Image: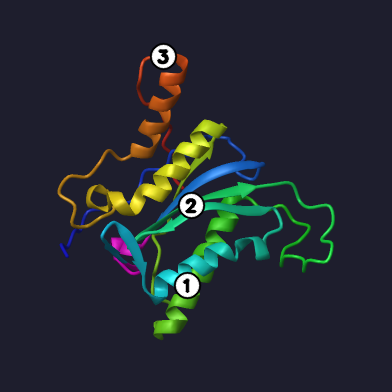
Amino acid sequence: MKSDSKDHRRRSIRLRDYDYAQIGAYFVTIVTQGRKCLFGEIVEAEMRLNDAGRIIQTAWNDLPNHYANVEVDTFVVMPNHIHGIINLIDLPVGAGFKPAPTNAGTHHGLSEIVRAFKTFSARRINNSRNTSGAPVWQRNYFEHVIRDEASLNRIRQYILDNPARWEYDRENPDTTKPEPEYQWRMETVMGASLRSGQPRGVAPTKNHPS
């Protein structure tokens, strides 16, 4: 695998003054420290998870058990990053016969939930490897507010297709022909343009520190 000293962190397109605790769907990408391929490998366009990858999958699925206002949607573990959709919802009125989540009664924002996912998963991976405190994730993460059902479905498909596109993935340390940084966004905007009859193109984005 090629060594690369460049900083490959994704640029944030976080919206200034947007409340990331409000109800809605959010597309999230988190990359490993140094883009190290820690979670498995792509074989014949399918992701083969190793033990660390399975820990990541479990930590993601476990989020609603800790946060009452969270539902997890489409998700994929890649060799050195994850893509997923987090839905922030209204707090449930009553727990019924189901055990209440750890943080029942509190509405948590996206950044807190992502931070918890990174912490939970990194701790479990380090415990399994006896590498206490070793960095697993980059400090920052990427997020995008999903505005409508059409964008939601296109991003879902992008996530599902990710293993088959690994050869062109910008996070792949060995790629020689990376796709555009916001390929998922281009496909979403192009789809909207086709429906509306407007010219194709990528909407302007704002860059802010995570």
Q: Position of residue 48 (x, y in %)?
A: 34, 67
Q: Which residues are magenta?
A: 31-40
Q: Residue at x 59, y 57 (%)?
A: 113
Label 2 Cα neighbours within 10 Å, binned few <14 / some 14-19 / many ≥20: many
Q: Residue at x 60, y 66 (%)?
A: 62
Farthest bottom residue in view: 130
Is 117 part of what is drawn in magenta? no
Can residue 189 be seen from the camera position used here?
Answer: yes
Residue pointed to by mark 1? 55
Mark 1–mark 2 Cα distance, whole angstroms, equals 15 Å
What label does residue 84 carry, if any? Answer: 2
Q: Is residue 59 left or right of residue 197?
A: right
Q: Residue at x 57, y 63 (%)?
A: 61
Q: Is residue 119 left or right of residue 24?
A: left
**Is label 2 in a helix, a strand or a loop?**
strand
Mark 1–mark 3 Cα distance, whole angstroms, equals 44 Å
What label does residue 198 carry, if any? Answer: 3
Q: What kind of residue is marked 3?
A: Gln
Q: Position of residue 153 (x, y in %)?
A: 50, 38
